[in-house]
Amino acid sequence: MINKPLIGIIDISINNILSIKRAFQNIGSKVIVIDEQRNVEKFDIIVLPGVGAYHEAMKKLRDTKLILSIEQALNKNKSFLGICLGMQLLFEESEEFGLTKGIGFFKGKVKNFNKFNVEKQTFIGWNRVKFSKKIISMPKKYIEKNLLNSAFYFVHSFFVNCENKEIETGTSYNGKLNFSSIVKKDKVVAFQFHPEKSGNNGLILLKSMVKNILQ
Amino acid sequence: MHLEGLRVLGYPEFFAQKYFEENIDEIIFQDVVASLYKRNQLTSLTNKISKNIFVPITVGGGIRNVSDIKEILINGADRVSINTAAVNDKKFIKESVKVFGSSTITITIESSKVGERYKVYTDSGRTETNINTFEWIKEVQDMGVGEIILTSINNEGTGKGFDLNLYEKASKICNISLLAHGGTRNSEDIYKLFINTDIDGAIIASAFHYNYYKELLNKKKISLRGSTNFLVNQDFKNIFFFGVKDLKKYLKSKNISIR
């Protein structure tokens, strides 16, 4: 790669974006933090990270008008990555504190683990991800050896179970409850886990995505 | 040992980097005497340690208010662990859970068996309280925190193995993530912990540190301050150590589900 890929990270200051920034820098990308509405044309990938409360995040996105930058990226078919809460925000609504409307790029509802028979109501730790489809073009052997069925780091009390299996590209379990841990539609990919906290496998996944997008 | 007699082993950032390279699952960084000396130097260290580490990092020691937590998180930690301030100020914990979310707040419980009772201690095992460990676990859960680190002061640094009785009882009443700390002598201790209790993770300090310190010490030729007699005299009595990779290989061979 001659030019470093340019990554725009949406910062709504309710989350810590330092580790995401460092992870992208570690794999050779240039990072710009987007903390106010701006034209996102020049970015190779827009990243929407997030830890914290759904309604709080949606409110911040609207108050700062960052929602407009996100919509621009999604409408212009830009490569887009949602992480954890950032994935959930891309769905239609969440049942956290009543109902909160989300960005609505993916169809479906974010639900609370506490209404289901799960092993942990707040899941903190490593969990396996079963890749049901290819999200990135890598040599098959490589994916099988390094990523298929490997564990990634999750922190969440809410989850999505996509009805549309077309967009569900990875699944995981909490107890016996199956949920979507990766979703993909067009050039938008979202992870329920934190690739920036998932050790070398997480970095490999990010790196492959960036490489894939630039090809 | 028993959270006392601290020894200097080297620079934390080198250890953190090494553990990350060896596929460790999480790193916990604790300034053990921060509350005792009322100091707070974690912020810059957190930033340094977390620079090239891409696994979760929990930082603790002397955290007393919401702005302490904020500073540590901004500098690269994923969670903070709190002991003394939780015992002294429950309102602070409830507020922290509300501001930062359950999954960001870990409570460390230092427990010592006094007679037949497990009592809670603060200030790195120096101040005895009248709180029963198991009652405290329930109370902490009710405050909404996401995780508990349970340290056995009796076993910490002794290589006696884990206090299985403590962890079995604790894991029965605990429905949030519970980590055991204190007493690892060898890989088998960790295997025993996982098959006999419902614990979510094991915290290992000495056994790993001693395994790597020689190699890491030479990385930076700056004189270390503090109690370094141990390093000079190479006093290895009663110390057992093993590497991260070896431990994982062993646990896998025993069919323990591990990353």
Image (spheres, helix red, strand yellow):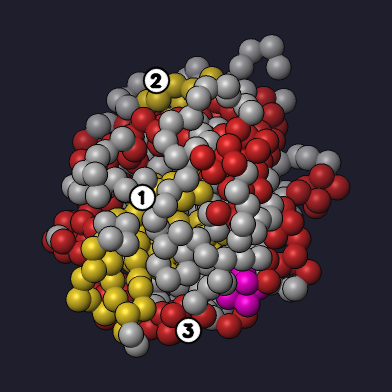
Marks 2 and 1, how far apart at CA: 47 Å
For mark 1, give the secondary structure.
loop
For label 3, the residue is: B165
Q: From the image, which quarter does the N terminus of chain A lie in?
A: top right
Q: Is residue B113 above or below residue B241?
A: below
The single residue placed furthest to the right in the displayed view is A141
Q: Which residue occupies the foreground of this view, A5 or B221?
A: B221
The circle drawn on residue A39 is 2
What x and y, as percent, mark residue B20? 61, 43
What x and y, as percent, mark residue A172? 59, 64
Q: Is residue B23 visible?
A: no
What amino acid type is highlighted by mark number 1?
A: Val
The circle drawn on residue B151 is none
Q: Which residues are magenta?
A: B189-193
Q: Which residue occupies the foreground of this view, A83 or B9?
A: B9
What amino acid type is highlighted by mark number 3?
A: Asn
In screen coordinates, is B116 left or right of A160? Answer: left
What amino acid type is highlighted by mark number 2?
A: Asn
- Which residue is depicted at the point 67% across and 25% down? A214
Q: Is residue A141 visible?
A: yes
Marks 3 and 2, how far apart at CA: 60 Å
Q: From the image, which quarter does the C terminus of chain A lie in?
A: top right
For mark 3, give the secondary structure.
helix
How many residues crowd mark 3 within 10 Å: few (<14), some (14–19), many (20+)?
few
Which numbered disc, 3 or 2, marks the residue closer to the eye?
A: 3
In screen coordinates, is A96 left or right of A23? Answer: left
How many residues crowd mark 1 within 10 Å: few (<14), some (14–19), many (20+)?
some
- Which residue is depicted at the point 51% across and 40% down? B229
The single residue placed furthest to the bottom in the displayed view is B116
Q: Which residue occupies the foreground of this view, B214 or A138?
A: B214
- Which residue is depicted at the point 21% across and 36% down? A63
For label 1, the residue is: B32
